[in-house]
Amino acid sequence: MSIWAICSSPHGHGLRRIAAAAALLGGASTPLGAQITLQEALNSAFPPPAATVDRKTAYLSEAALDSTRAEAGPDAPVSQSVVSYYVGTRDGKPVGVAYFDSHRVRTVNEVLMIVVGTDDRIREIEVLRFAEPPEYKPGEKWLAQFGGKTLTPALSLKGDIVMMTGATLTSNAVTRAVRRVLALHRRIRPFAAP
């Protein structure tokens, strides 16, 4: 299940489910890397009190999903028609939007916060959960190469993205997540006037 599905609970229990999942992950017998909460990640991307964050939800039609899938590419599946996202504002103006993506790396899921700026380019990526062996975890320096990227054919491991040495599955998983988020971002258009 993607983090979008968890956040998009029709009964408004999304954040409680994330907290419960985080508690379960935190209670595992093996150490997990980069264990931060959704709120800590949002505070890092949009530091209070100067910035505020509003949770919003987009509902995609089947046609919109098909278009998003085509833009993301066949290796970056998009299955959720209900997408939660978090718009950061400062002085009443948007400064960015955060999306959360949960995906399988090898045998367990990784959760990323992917922040897109008002210029529709990747601003930052934060790892919230990574339960694979720590040597496969994407580091800040490797993630930084996504900064400023937009959804183009060059956003791939055969293009501008350099693969992590010895971590092919992680490299693929992160690149797919970024492509998926940018395709959804294009469809949702969170900075457009209502």
Image (cartoon, helix red, strand yellow):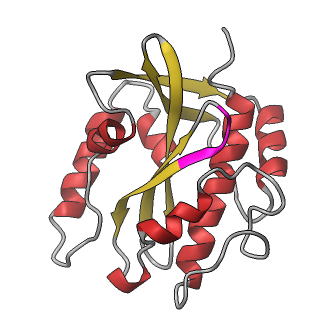
Position of the C terminus by quadrant = top right
Residue 145 versus residue 67 in the image, above or below: below
Please say if 119 is above or below 77: above
Q: Residue at horizontal 45%, vertical 72%?
A: 138
Q: Judge left or right: residue 154 versus residue 17.
A: right
Report the front residue among 3 and 123. Answer: 123
Q: Residue at left 29%, top 64%?
A: 34
Q: Which residues are magenta?
A: 119-123
Name the chief secondary structure element in magenta.
loop
From the top left corner, tell me how far across and down residue 84 is, in percent.
51, 32
Does residue 18 show up magenta in the picture? no
Viewed as shown, does residue 11 lie left or right of 65? left
Q: Return the residue nearer the eye: 194 or 64.
A: 194
- At which x and y percent is residue 2? 50, 51
Image coordinates of residue 180 in percent, x first then y, are 67, 51
Along the line of sight, the residue nearer the viewer: 168 or 139: 139
